[in-house]
Image (cartoon, rainbow, N blue to C red):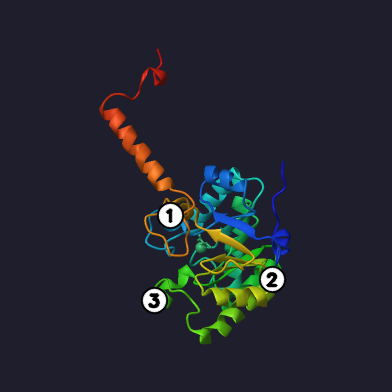
Amino acid sequence: SVKRFTAPQIAARKRDTPIVSLTAYTAPMAALIDEHAELILVGDSLGMVVHGLPSTIGVTLEMMILHGQAVMRGSHRAMVVVDMPFGSYEESPEQAFRNAARVMQETGCGGVKLEGGARMAETVAFLTSRGIPVMGHVGLTPQATHVMGGFKTQGRDEDSWPAHIDDARAIADAGAFCVVVEGVMAELANRITSAIQVPTIGIGASAQCDGQILVIDDMLGMSARVPRFVRKFGNAGEICADAIAEYAAAVRDRSFPAPEQTYR
Ligand code: KIV
Ligand code: NA
C-alpha cells in the first residue's frame, strides 16, 4: 500500500512546486483525483454541490463523515482533509476537538479544515497540540456569508489588508499546516503568501500562492453557475446532458436495449 502525503510534507512545500488540490465528495471521483493531486479536500461545499442546499450552513458533521469515508475509500495517495461544518467548532476549542476527533476516528482522514483567522487561533493550537492537523481558511469564508452580507471578494479596500494578513499569520503561528486563501485581491494573496511560513492554497486568490484548489464540479463544468475565479477545464455537464438525452431517445424508440445488451 502506498503511503499518503502527510501534513508535514504539505507544510514543507512552502515556496516549492505548487501543491495540487481539488475537492471530492465520492469514492470514484477521489480515485481519479488521487492520481494527480497531493491534497483532497472533502469540502462542506458538498452541501450545495451534492445535496442541493442553498449554502454550507445546513451541512452537518454526519454528512461530512459520510463523504469523508467515501473519499478515503476511493483514494490511497493524497492527503485527505475534511471540512468542519458550521456549528461544529466555533463554540470552544473543546467542542472543536471533540468533533474533529470524531471526524478523524470515523473517516481515517489526515486532518481537518476550519474557517476563520485570529479568533480561531486558540482552537487551531488546541487541535494541533493534541494530534489533529489543521488547515486554515481565510479571506472569503463562506460559512460567514450571513455576517459579511453575501459572497464578497475580500481586500478590495487596501485598509483591510493588515487585518487579513494578521488573520493568516495568527492561524499559521498557531500551527496550521497550510492555509486556504479564498476570494481575495491577488496582491493581498501575495502579501499573505509572503507573510506566513506555511503554504497558502489559493482559490480566487493568486497564481503566486503555494498551491491551488477548486471545487471539482466547478472545474469539470458540472455546475450551473460558477464564480469568475473558476476555469472550466472540462464540459462534463454537457457530456452528461447529451448522454442522458440520447438514452431517453433510445428508450422511447426501443433501440435500447439492442441485442448486445440483451441476454439470449
Ligand atoms: O468547501 C470547499 O469546497 C472549500 C474549498 C473551496 C476551499 O472550502
Ligand atoms: Na468549505
Q: Is residue 29 above or below residue 159?
A: above
Q: Is residue 121 visible?
A: no
Disc on the earlier residue, 2 or 3: 3
Name which residue type carries label 1: Val
Please state the horizontal and vertical placement of residue 12, each as a whole percent of the image.
73, 63
User: Which residue is identified by label 2?
Assistant: 175
Please state the horizontal and vertical placement of residue 200, each as a whole percent of the image.
62, 68
What separation in Å lies between label 1 and label 3 (alpha carbons)?
21 Å
Q: Quadrant of the C terminus?
A: top left
Contact between marks 1 and 2 (CB within 8 A): the answer is no
User: Which residue is identified by label 1?
Assistant: 49
Left or right: 34, with 261 as reference point:
right
Does dot 2 land on a helix, a strand or a loop?
A: loop
Contact between marks 1 and 3 (CB within 8 A): the answer is no
Does dot 3 land on a helix, a strand or a loop?
A: loop
Disc on the earlier residue, 1 or 2: 1
Q: Residue 255 versus residue 94: which sits nearer the camera?
A: 255
Disc 2 or disc 3, which is closer to the eye? 3
Task: Tell me the number on the disc at residue 149.
Answer: 3
Disc on the earlier residue, 1 or 3: 1
Q: Residue at x 56, y 55 (%)?
A: 22
What separation in Å lies between label 1 and label 2 (alpha carbons)?
30 Å
Name which residue type carries label 3: Gly
Q: Residue 72 versus residue 5: which sits nearer the camera?
A: 5
Please state the horizontal and vertical placement of residue 141, each as a whole percent of the image.
49, 70
Name which residue type carries label 2: Gly
> Cβ of disc 1 within 8 Å of ligand 1?
yes
Number of numbered labels in the structure image:
3
Mark 1 nearby-residue class (10 Å; few <14, some 14–19, many ≥20): many
Left or right: 20, with 197 as reference point:
left
